[in-house]
Image (cartoon, helix red, strand yellow):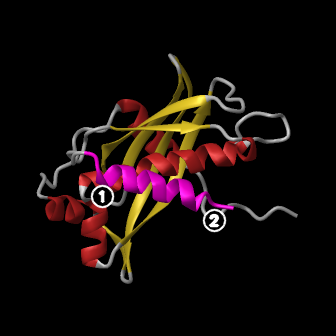
Amino acid sequence: MYPFLRMFKELARARSMPPLGLFDTHVSHHLCWPWDLDPWVELNNGRTLTIYDLGRLPLGARTGIHGILKAKGWGMTVAGSSIRYRKRVTVFSKLTTYSRCLGWDDRFLYMEQSMWKGRDCTSQVLIRSAIVSKAGIVPPPELAKAAGVSTESPDLPGWVKAWIAADATRPWPPERQA
């Protein structure tokens, strides 16, 4: 089940924090609970992505993006992700996540998040998000304009551009398996 109480707690905390610029970093703190574990007694890979949600949602609130989405009748959805897992996270580990927007292309926003246990990075994720309306995908420059920032994206890091290019070669829809 989605951790709605944790989500509401993080959003309430974000309301009491100072606003952020669109490209600033939101820092959040989490604990790995027993119900976050997989059968190998470490943080479940799906729950890792959920904890990243708990960093992105307050980021959207603090940057004003949520207000813009609500005012325009838009939504935002994850349209792709790439994650690296590097260190185990066990029960009651104290975690710090860093969440920030990197920029956009003609269709998607790109966000980077990392999760840390002390000085060790446990994982990092690149999230591709689409702004959606009843008419379909909203070009990110429209969001930037509504946010009062340049409609031109900062230059995306090379590793993000390489991921975008590699992902574009992936067939869609995938071939159906027998």
Identity, as a three-letter code, of the amino acid under mark 1 = Asp
Q: Position of residue 139 (x, y in %)?
A: 28, 65
Secondary element at tag 2: loop
Give the side of residue 78 with respect to residue 20, left or right.
Answer: right
Q: Position of residue 38 (x, y in %)?
A: 79, 42
Is residue 24 magenta-colored? no
In the displayed orientation, state which residue is furthest to the right. 178
Vertical position of residue 84 compared to residue 12: above or below: above
Residue in front for this viewpoint, 57 or 6:
6
Give the side of residue 145 with respect to residue 125, left or right.
Answer: left
Q: What's the mark number on residue 136?
A: none
Q: Which residue, given by chain and number where applicable, does mark 1 sit on?
A: 106
Residue in front for this viewpoint, 87 or 32:
32
Q: Residue at left 52%, top 26%?
A: 116
Give the side of residue 20 with respect to residue 121, left or right.
Answer: left
Secondary element at tag 1: loop
The residue segment tinted magenta is 1-17
Residue 57 is at least partly visible in this image: no
Q: Position of residue 1 (x, y in %)?
A: 69, 61
Identity, as a three-letter code, of the amino acid under mark 2 = Pro
Residue in front for this viewpoint, 153 or 149:
149
Vertical position of residue 44 compared to residue 94: above or below: below
Q: Which residue, given by chain and number where applicable, does mark 2 sit on?
A: 173
